[in-house]
Image: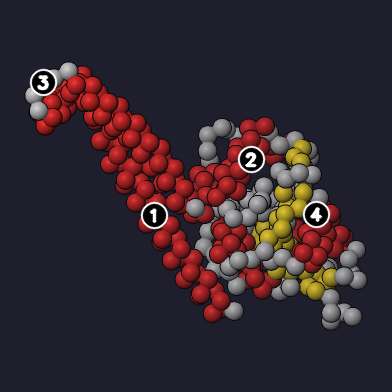
Amino acid sequence: MTAERKLVTLLVPAYNEALKIMASLTAMYDYMGRLPDRYRFELLVVDDGSTDETAAIVTAFASKRREVRLLQQPANMRLGQALRDGFAESKGDIIVVFDSDLSYSVEHIGQMLETMEREQVAMVVASPYMKGGKTTAVPWNRAQMSKQVNRLLSAGSQYDLHTVTSMVRAYDGDFIRGLSLKSMGPEINTEILYKAQIMRARVAEVPAHLDWSDQAERIATRKVSLKFTTTSKLLVFASFLYRPIVFFMIPGLFLLLISFWSGGSLAWTVWREAGHLGGGWDARITNGFAEAWKLRPQTFIIAGFTFVVAVQLISLGLLAAQAKRYFEELFYAATRRGD
């Protein structure tokens, strides 16, 4: 029976979490200990170069618990590197990535594990923005910015997900370890979904509760602005990677519409002016253009400029779509060979 139980790696990236890490690890460890009939587990903490006592606390916690391991980074490498190293070091059949500050309750672990096994998917995402999910005590500005970024990413993705950026997820161990990743920051979560999409992996989403109620001190030190942070800019750029053709085609078609409207307006002006002139049709049309230029020179400029830019944008969109498809085919083939 023991050999048949799946091994779950609870992967916890941590940076300067000395104030909360002991309580968080205790809650996670105790929760996993309540699932012995279903899963074996290891608790892998990746200390991302903390400058406080985080590593020492984790070491002390692990000294009396053989299921707990610490992977210590020599310096702050950021979330993406911490997750990549954690994936490589993990041994689990299933890997659950979880917040070190317990902004999501430990019950979400079981919910994701159940969904993964029931629906036979490669990944389960915890989502506070889907129906049934919610946020508590998250600053309004921060929540709104996050929701808008996720809407943009979701619109570009082939998955019907509400929280593309969520870090709290469950992964099939072999799948995530076999995925070639390169992001250094939080955008790694978007990269994983994009590459899962390339691999035609099935993904599920479960409602989650993001709760910052007990983080008043942490929230007070986080300056939240409506301006995009560096991470937000990277995430917006990630939506370009999902469907680059949209970023070129939509403005291109809009400018093409302006060009056609301006051109049609000019044609009407030329026809109207030509009808007031004498002589043959060639002379009348030529003079009609001359009169239209005198009356509306700016329309000629707008029509010409928007047409040229529209053609360039549409061409770039087609080239980007072709390059994206070529990359995806190469990535799929290379990853499948790695299997």
Q: Secondary structure at mark 1?
A: helix
Q: Is residue 135 left or right of residue 71?
A: right
Q: Quadrant of residue 119?
A: bottom right
Is residue 26 visible in this depiction of the protein?
no
Cα separation, mark 2 vs mark 1, equals 29 Å
Q: Quadrant of the N terminus?
A: bottom right
Q: Amino acid at mark 1?
A: Leu
**Which residue is tagged 3?**
278
Cα separation, mark 3 vs mark 4, equals 82 Å
The residue at the point 31 percent across, 47 percent down is: 312
Cα separation, mark 1 vs mark 4, equals 42 Å
Cα separation, mark 2 vs mark 3, equals 64 Å
**Which residue is tagged 4?**
108
Q: Amino acid at mark 2?
A: Lys
Mark number displayed over residue 147: 2
Q: Secondary structure at mark 4?
A: helix
**Which residue is tagged 1?**
318
Mark with earlier residue (2, 4): 4
Mark with earlier residue (1, 3): 3
